[in-house]
């Protein structure tokens, strides 16, 4: 995979859910998220991220295989910790599965997974995904309690939820940034690969991308929004440039 030789290079996973959101608005097959995945691959993105929700509001079951077949990029499947999603993940064997909390009424993933509170529920799911060779990531808030839970669950990766960072301003943002910075260092020290994502934009990505231990950012909504104005390739390249400049 691109970037493996340079440990300082932060991988960019592009979440293509909202290409499917636009497609689904008309119920047809345009715009196709597969085409977005191909563009991401052609312009140097490091991975494709897709969230198969219980209500299938964006990515649908049949998209997964088509996305996997369309490029050589690793697929990071975001999924709720349910039996249904576990069976789908085991059938598709994506490179990675990021376990996220999911509430039917939410517009997007609000807050991190309570890995600490859900330990017993998550343990067999993490185990079965890992046994199938799928790299498990837990989408958590950057707190010691959740990181400790991820360690106890044996997750090789955590993705820190940057939603609060993205929405906060001034001192509040600085405080959350410090929390993410500290937890990224602690994760790496304990052998967990830290990632981050949610709500990242051209304007707020730099301080996050500068956190040296972070290995990957997953970015979707903003990039797809910018793609409407500039095209997907320029949007991905601009984000890539900002990430590189931050290191
Ligand atoms: N990472 C995870 C685990 C997510 O659930 C999401 C949103 O689906 C993202 C990253 C991307 O967030 P955004 O679309 O705000 O860039």
Image (cartoon, rainbow, N blue to C red):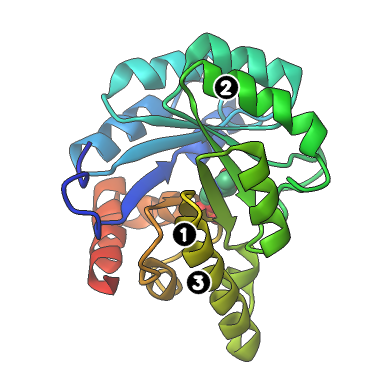
Residue sitting nearer the eye, 41 or 188: 188
Residue 148 percent coordinates (x, y):
67, 53
- Residue 244 left/right relative to 50: left
How far apart in space, not on screen, are marks 1 and 3 (Cα)? Answer: 12 Å
- The residue at 26%/70% (across/down) is 247
Residue sitting nearer the eye, 91 or 66: 91
Residue sitting nearer the eye, 17 or 25: 17
Circle 3: element type? helix
Mark 3 burial class by Cα count in 10 Å: few <14, some 14-19, many 20+: many
How far apart in space, not on screen, are marks 1 and 2 (Cα)? Answer: 24 Å
Mark 2 burial class by Cα count in 10 Å: few <14, some 14-19, many 20+: many
Farthest-out residue, left: 5
Residue 196 percent coordinates (x, y):
50, 56
The residue carrying mark 2 is 129
21 versus 93 height, above or below: below
Quarter of the rendering containing residue 71 = top left
Residue 209 percent coordinates (x, y):
37, 67
Quarter of the rendering containing residue 147 = bottom right
Circle 2: element type? helix
190 versus 102 height, above or below: below
Identify the mark nearer the N-term, 2 or 3.
Answer: 2
- The residue at 39%/62% (across/down) is 213
Residue 69 percent coordinates (x, y):
33, 15
The label nearer to you, 1 versus 3, is 1
Residue sitting nearer the eye, 230 or 53: 53
The residue carrying mark 1 is 189
- Residue 63 left/right relative to 247: right
Asked if residue 108 can be seen in this view, the reply is no
21 versus 139 height, above or below: above
């Amino acid at each position: 995979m691109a970037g493996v030789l340079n440990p300082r290079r932060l991988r960019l996973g592009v979440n293509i859910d909202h290409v499917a959101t636009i497609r689904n608005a008309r119920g047809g097959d345009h715009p196709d998220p597969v085409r977005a995945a191909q563009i991401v691959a052609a312009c140097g993105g490091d991975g494709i991220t897709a969230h198969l929700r219980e209500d299938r509001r964006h990515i649908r079951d049949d998209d997964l295989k088509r996305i996997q077949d369309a490029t050589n990029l690793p697929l990071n499947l975001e999924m709720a910790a349910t039996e249904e999603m576990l069976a789908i993940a085991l059938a598709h064997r994506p490179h990675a599965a990021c376990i996220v909390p999911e509430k039917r009424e939410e517009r997007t993933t609000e807050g991190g997974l309570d890995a600490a509170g859900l330990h017993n529920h998550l343990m067999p799911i993490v185990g079965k995904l890992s046994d199938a060779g799928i790299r498990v990531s837990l989408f958590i808030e950057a707190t010691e309690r959740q990181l400790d839970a991820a360690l106890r669950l044996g997750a090789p990766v955590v993705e820190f939820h940057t939603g609060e960072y993205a929405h906060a301003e001034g001192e509040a943002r600085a405080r959350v940034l410090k929390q993410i910075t500290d937890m990224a260092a602690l994760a790496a020290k304990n052998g967990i690969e830290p990632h981050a994502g949610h709500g990242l934009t051209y304007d707020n990505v730099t301080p996050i991308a500068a956190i040296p231990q972070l290995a990957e950012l997953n970015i979707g909504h903003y990039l797809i929004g910018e793609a409407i104005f500039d095209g997907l390739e320029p949007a991905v390249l601009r984000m890539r440039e900002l990430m590189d400049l931050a290191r």
